Image (spheres, helix red, strand yellow):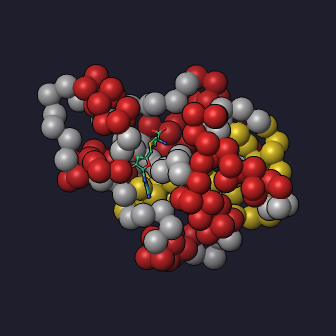
């Protein structure tokens, strides 16, 4: 399987430590080729992976660097981008994909139907890093997270002002509390 991991070792440790103590299903926004989802699957809990799997929504770094290195001989298209993720979904029964914009009503409905009667215990946000998208994701997905559940943000760093400002807003207005600051920032739902 071709599931490249694009997180640093510190970030991987943070993500795995949270996944180890969170209870209930996990939602991941931004799954790419499945690296972070595959790591979290070791806890054998449902992981709902939300992504557009469209070449156009990858930034230049993801478009060039990783693809050239990992997929030297493959021209990545929208179809084989998703097909590579589907290999992982077929191999790991806990993983379910939802293809679409993270905040589109159809996507949210599909995530809700996969959750059934449950709420998520952990939501990992690593999709489009604009302020508008991350803010909308926080608002929409907090409704699907248990009180005290974990909302984890990758790329909380000045290079990604949208992520920093959206998380800070949710902390300042009392919806989230930071429990572990860092490049991967861990919050709890209040
Ligand atoms: C940095 S990558 C995620 C990396 C992944 N978490 C990992 O560690 O392997 C960001 C992902 O967000 C997805 N994405 C971008 N905009 C999106 C949107 N509006 N809705 C859903 N996913 C989106 C991209 O397709 C890409 O796969």
Quick one: 184 or 90, which is closer to the camera? 184
Query: Residue 163's spot in the image, x, y percent?
Result: 62, 46
Q: State whether residue 175 is above or below residue 187.
A: below
Q: Quadrant of the C terminus?
A: bottom right
Q: Is residue 166 visible?
A: yes
Q: Is residue 24 left or right of residue 78?
A: right
Q: Is residue 47 visible?
A: no
- Residue 180 is drawn in which quadrant? top right
Q: Name which residue lies at 20% across and 41% down.
A: 76
Quick one: 89 or 136, which is closer to the camera? 136
- Residue 12 is drawn in which quadrant? top right
Q: Is residue 28 left or right of residue 10?
A: left
Q: Is residue 68 left or right of residue 128?
A: left
Query: Residue 158's spot in the image, x, y percent?
Result: 64, 34
Q: Quadrant of the N terminus?
A: top left
- Residue 143 is drawn in which quadrant? bottom right
Q: State whether residue 155 is above or below residue 128.
A: above
Quick one: 48 or 64, which is closer to the camera? 64
Q: Is residue 185 left or right of residue 51?
A: right
Query: Residue 75's spot in the image, x, y percent?
Result: 15, 37
Quick one: 110 or 72, which is closer to the camera? 72
Q: Name which residue lies at 35% across and 36% down.
A: 60
Q: Name which residue lies at 74% across and 64% down.
A: 146
């Amino acid at each position: 399987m071709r599931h490249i991991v694009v997180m640093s070792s510190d970030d991987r440790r943070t993500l795995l430590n949270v996944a180890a103590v969170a209870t209930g299903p996990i939602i991941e926004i931004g799954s790419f080729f499945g690296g972070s989802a595959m790591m979290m699957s070791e806890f054998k809990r449902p992981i709902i992976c939300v992504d557009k799997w469209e070449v156009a929504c990858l930034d230049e770094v993801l478009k060039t660097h990783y693809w050239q290195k990992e997929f030297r001989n493959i021209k990545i298209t929208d179809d084989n981008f998703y097909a590579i993720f589907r290999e992982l979904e077929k191999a790991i029964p806990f993983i379910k994909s939802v293809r679409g914009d993270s905040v589109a009503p159809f996507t949210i409905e599909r995530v809700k139907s996969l959750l059934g009667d449950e709420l998520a215990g952990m939501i990992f946000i690593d999709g489009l890093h604009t302020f508008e998208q991350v803010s909308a994701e926080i608002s929409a997905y907090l409704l699907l997270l248990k009180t005290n559940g974990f909302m984890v943000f990758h790329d909380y760093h000045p290079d990604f002002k949208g992520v920093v400002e959206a998380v800070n807003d949710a902390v300042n207005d009392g919806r989230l509390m930071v429990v572990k600051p860092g490049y991967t920032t861990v919050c709890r739902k209040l």
